[in-house]
């Protein structure tokens, strides 16, 4: 697919990347040459077809050279998240049977237990300087690649256990990328700002492989801390992200609004309300259209430019639940945000809202060629072109996840009457209180996170007499607002009281504890995808949790 597109687009820009603070460009032809150079270097380094090659590093043009170069050499890319601990990296190397590795720098190379290691800024850069030297051998290897052959092994730890290697074939990546392009109106005139880690399928497939399919341009971001500046510089037309980035953008807007005069605040809220009415209306009246033009001129158009650069056609959101108020805010200002859902085991997304078919609090409808059904216990099952071959060297886990061609996702969900899928919880997240009542914690945590002072919320109650929560306030933001711990606690309690008024008595949150800092990967509290490992957190904060039950009444 890449080489066909490179022949089609030639000298057109493909990838933009920063070098010493200035944006540089790699064309399709240049990328083709450099990928072949890396493949040649791998051949000369002794990498054979079918060998597993570790690729660890931050997002960069060099990372992309290596990924496509490994594939062109007939080998298998094993991407590793750069923040992974040496222990996790060692397990991935052992399970994958990797014989060679490429690292972006010596610090990451030090995590590797392999003897054969190339550095992107040294050996790989030298291969690229020399250019392709093994074109006949590389061409011969590519000609022998079958679409159903293994292309990459992507490791995912989830929130429990050792990392599992998801085997994805060449066909998986191409077919699911084509399916995404069929439902989203993206063309070779689109440009995306890419920041999601390439070591994970969300960024690698949706920002890179999908971009190859539609022939657009990609700008490689320096990371989430630089997005605000880069959105202004790049002015992308599309962008993918996890909800946390959108939540921060929304919080930044609200913080700025707080500093406005009372008249300006009133104008902002009036404009936002008009924008909300306008997009909710199937056929807006002439009066509403007039108000919307005024609101757009006064507030909304300027806000779009500040947040997105002014050319953005839509955001894609995935990887976690997207709160309705965040989704509704962006639609209100004229920036569609399209929520989707997928897994590493399905080659990323398998369904999404689109510009034509959108419904709040859902993840849209299945992509073409994807079947989704709901099991008797509510679990979402998926059969589609992206379904993995299996877990590498783990037949037991494969048998549990993949049955008769269906992926058992572990997510609980339901279809509405119009075929939109709604994710309601994780199957393994459900717990039962001491009173025998089942609790779905994710909706409760989403409700808590509507409080803008929180950066994290975790609901507790497995085997307990009632439900409680651990919450992590944004202490820095609270300080900027002049709020002390007592005021923060009062704000959170107000949110809980509002939630509890609409809950069954067995699922109401009785107590909560504020923590000084967020959970971390280093402490083993977050997975590679930054999902909370509930058991680890429960162990680490056992004393705080016990204090919410010792000598307390569930009627409080």
Image (cartoon, rainbow, N blue to C red):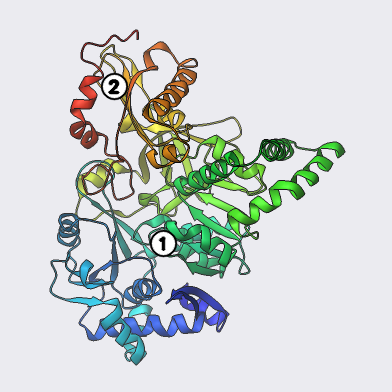
Q: Quadrant of residue 441?
A: top left
296 over 125 or under it: above or below: above
Q: Is residue 183 visible?
A: no
How far apart, in angstroms, are the residues tagged by discs 2 and 1? 37 Å
Would you say 113 lies left or right of 148 here? left
Q: Which residue is mark 1?
A: 204
Q: Is residue 420 left or right of residue 488?
A: right
**Percent coordinates x, y for residue 430 in the rendering:** 33, 27
Residue 139 occupies quadrant? bottom left
Which numbered disc flags the more N-terminal residue, 2 or 1?
1
Residue 461, disc: 2
Residue 533, percent across and down? 27, 39
- The reply to whether residue 163 is visible in this rendering is yes
**In x, y percent, where is residue 305?**
64, 56
Question: Dot 1 lies on which element?
Answer: helix
SS for tag 2?
A: loop
Residue shown at 40% from the left, 74% from the top? 61
Q: Is residue 188 above or below residue 346?
A: below
Residue displayed at 28% across by 41% down: 519
Front one among 322 and 545: 545
Q: Residues within 10 Å of mark 1 (few under 14, many from 20)?
A: many
Task: Estimate how packed mark 2 is, as few (under 14), some (14 to 19) or many (20 or more) residues with alpha carbons within 10 Å.
Answer: many
Which residue does the image show at 29% across and 13% down from the upper left? 436
Judged left or right of residue 5, residue 430 is: left
Query: Which quadrant holds residue 63?
Result: bottom left
């Amino acid at each position: 697919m890449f080489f066909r597109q490179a022949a089609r687009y030639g000298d057109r820009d493909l990838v933009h990347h920063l070098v010493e603070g200035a944006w540089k460009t790699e064309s399709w032809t240049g990328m083709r040459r450099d990928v072949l150079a890396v493949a040649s270097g791998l051949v000369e380094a002794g990498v054979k077809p079918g060998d597993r090659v570790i690729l660890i590093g931050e997002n960069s043009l060099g990372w992309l050279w290596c990924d496509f170069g490994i594939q062109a050499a007939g080998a298998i890319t094993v991407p590793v998240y750069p923040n992974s601990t040496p222990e996790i990296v060692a397990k991935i190397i052992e399970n994958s049977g990797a014989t060679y590795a490429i690292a972006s720098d010596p610090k990451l190379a030090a995590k590797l237990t392999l003897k054969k290691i190339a550095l992107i800024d040294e050996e790989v850069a030298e291969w690229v300087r020399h250019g392709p030297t093994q074109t006949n051998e590389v061409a011969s290897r590519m000609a022998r690649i079958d679409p159903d052959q293994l292309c990459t092994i992507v490791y995912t730890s989830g929130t429990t256990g050792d990392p599992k290697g998801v085997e994805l074939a060449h066909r998986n990546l191409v077919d699911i990328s084509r399916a995404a392009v069929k439902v989203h109106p993206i063309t070779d005139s689109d440009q995306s700002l890419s920041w999601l880690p390439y070591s994970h399928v969300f960024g690698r497939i949706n920002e890179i492989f999908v971009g190859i399919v539609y022939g657009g341009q990609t700008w490689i971001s320096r990371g989430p801390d630089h997005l605000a500046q880069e959105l202004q510089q790049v002015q992308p037309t599309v962008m993918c992200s996890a909800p946390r980035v959108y939540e921060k953008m929304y919080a930044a807007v609200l913080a700025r609004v707080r500093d406005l005069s009372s008249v300006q605040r009133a104008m902002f809220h009036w404009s936002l309300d008009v924008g909300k009415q306008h997009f909710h209306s199937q056929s807006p009246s002439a009066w509403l259209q007039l108000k919307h033009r005024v609101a757009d001129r006064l507030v909304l158009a300027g806000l779009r430019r500040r947040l997105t650069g002014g050319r953005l056609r839509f955001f894609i959101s995935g990887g976690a639940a997207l709160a309705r108020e965040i989704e509704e805010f962006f639609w209100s200002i004229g920036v569609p945000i399209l929520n989707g859902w997928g897994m590493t085991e399905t080659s990323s997304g398998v369904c999404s809202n689109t510009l034509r078919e959108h419904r709040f609090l859902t993840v849209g409808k299945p992509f073409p060629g994807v079947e989704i059904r709901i099991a008797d216990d509510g679990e979402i099952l998926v059969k589609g072109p992206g379904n993995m071959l299996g877990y590498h060297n783990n037949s037991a886990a494969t048998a549990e996840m993949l049955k008769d061609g269906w992926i058992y996702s572990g997510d609980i969900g339901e279809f509405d009457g119009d075929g939109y899928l709604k994710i309601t919880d994780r199957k393994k997240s459900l717990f039962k209180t001491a009173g025998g009542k089942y609790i779905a914690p994710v909706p409760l945590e989403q409700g808590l996170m509507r409080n803008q002072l929180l950066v994290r919320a975790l609901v507790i109650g497995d085997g307990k007499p009632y439900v409680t929560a651990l919450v992590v306030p944004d202490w820095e933001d609270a300080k900027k607002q002049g709020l002390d711990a007592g005021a923060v606690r009062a704000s959170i309690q107000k949110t809980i009281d509002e939630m509890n008024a609409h809950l069954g008595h067995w699922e109401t949150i009785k107590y909560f504890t504020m923590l000084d800092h967020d959970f971390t990967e280093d402490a083993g509290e977050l997975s590679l995808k930054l999902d909370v490992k509930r058991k680890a957190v429960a162990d680490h904060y056992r004393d705080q949790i016990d204090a919410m039950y010792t000598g307390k009444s569930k009627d409080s």
